[in-house]
Image (cartoon, rainbow, N blue to C red):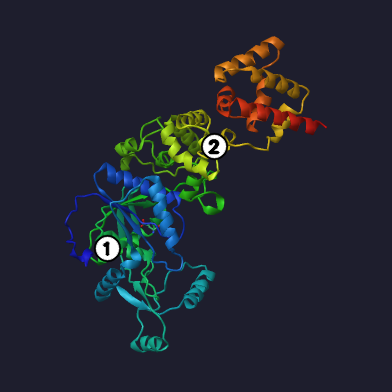
Amino acid sequence: MLFLNKEKGVIVNEIRVRIAPSPTGYLHVGTAHTALYNWFFARKNGGKFILRIEDTDIERSTKDMVDIIIESLKWLGIDWDEGPYFQSERYDQYREAANILEKKGYLYRCYCNKEEIEERRDKLISEGKAWKYDRHCLNLTEEQKERYEREGRLFALRFKVPEGITIFSDGLHNEIKRDNSEIEDFVVVRGNGHPTYNFAVVIDDSSMHISHIMRGEDHISNTPKQILIYNALDLDVPKFIHLPLILGEDRSKLSKRKGTVAVTDYRDMGYLPNAFVNFLALLGWSPAGEKEILSREELIDHFSIEALSKRSAIFDKKKLLWINAEYIKHMDAEELYKYVKPLWKKANFDLSLFDHNTLMRVIDLIKERARLLTDFVDSGYYFFREFDNYDEKGVNKHFLNDYSVNYLTLLSGEIEKLDKYSPDVIENLYRKIVEERNISAGKLIHPTRLALTGKTVGPSLFHLMEFVGKNRTLDRIKKAIDFINREND
Ligand code: GLU
């Protein structure tokens, strides 16, 4: 067996870290954050990053979730050097380790069923006392054991926690001490034969030669139990680093109930993987002072455990949106097109209306104001197809007044006469009308935008008009005039 082949005291010089998600749900942003720090650490130090799927909870683990977790990691651009290993395929190892522990006298069979435990626990709690497993099965007589066996009871294997103190030094929290009297004799193998998390995780981390375990702070209470198992099996204990949890904007733990926590949801909302990675990286770490936009290479280069914050960071959605907008703005149109094209196709946009270069110019135009990839659909459909809806507030303000029909009619006539339909020519036309009539530019611009896009805001009007083209501009202005006349009737 692998982990027993490992000689105690042999220092594995290589940095080996892992992420070990349970496929009982989507990849949570907290797990993605932990994965990212482990990955940075491995990449920075020429180490190995390992993916292990902790699927021993057979009732709650699904293959679909495994697929989504893998898809999410790939989307984030986090690659792994080994794995995915599946705990469900490693039962032989757990069984063997359990046998060794049993032989060494660390385990005992516990026949108590859930109801019996609950009854004893409730009684104690009602007396105002604290509960931990009362070692009911530690000293069963042979007759008692035989009776339970005859009754066909299943037994769990419990770890007999020795007296003493368990101490470990944490990379972020310094020394953490736990009196063993506070730790109950925990289950390592359940009645149904499945190993518990605290047991399987030790066997795996040891046999996979994990050097550093960087994981969420919510596991601090598990670590002493795991160390007891390492010691009982005479295995080297890896270094532990417990990361503060990410909090929601109300400072409570991020949860599905209160917001979006699945990485794939952020992908579907229109975030770019690099922007999302940049944002996650800054939750609990300031790699470069004030500088907040950092490439993956920079993040890897700056990464160090010592620089991580001990305090929880807040998942600030506004900042995420800002970072995403920055990435979009600075991205090359060709590069953006890779993300935008599938969205446009899905929205049934007729991309053949434009040649490739023009498409790139359309992207460059939209990207100035876009914050999400989905904005390329929401702020871009009017380049590709006709529409029927106008923004309601816009209609009240820019259509239903005493000038819009007159000006739109005037514009239509003037546009008709234009030979060249380029942004500067269109702009000159608007400027001329504004000056001649001594009116505010808004009285021309707002109704035009609403007529051409159905919206009150969007990219530079004269530029977008070029892409909509003269004929479609005239058609849409006519359609808008008809609409206003109908509304006014
Ligand atoms: N499967 C555990 C989890 O998802 C892994 C914890 C650990 O990293 O040890 O929380």
Residue occupying the point 30% across, 57% down: 83
Q: In percent of the image, x 16 and y 56: which residue is there?
A: 10
Residue closer to the observer: 161 or 42: 42
Q: Quadrant of the N terminus?
A: bottom left
Where residue 380 sits: x, y (%)?
A: 56, 35
Q: Are dots 2 and 1 in contact, CB under 8 Å?
A: no
Under mark 2, the amino acid is Asp
The kind of secondary structure element at disc 2 is helix
Residue 110 is situated, as x and y percent measured from the top left of the image, at: 38, 77
Query: For disc 2, does the CB lie below 8 Å from ligand 1?
Result: no
Q: Nearer the viewer, residue 448 or 36?
A: 448
- Circle 2 Cα neighbour tier, 10 Å, few/some/many (<14 / 14–19 / ≥20): some
Q: Which residue is mark 1?
A: 230
Specify the quarter for ligand 1: bottom left
Q: Nearer the viewer, residue 291 or 10?
A: 291
Please tell me whether mark 2 or mark 1 is closer to you in this view. 2
Task: Please determine whether, in this image, residue 370 is positioned above or below residue 174.
Answer: above
Q: Label 2: which residue?
A: 375
Is 103 on the left-hand or right-hand side of 442?
Answer: left
Viewed as shown, does residue 148 lie left or right of 258?
left
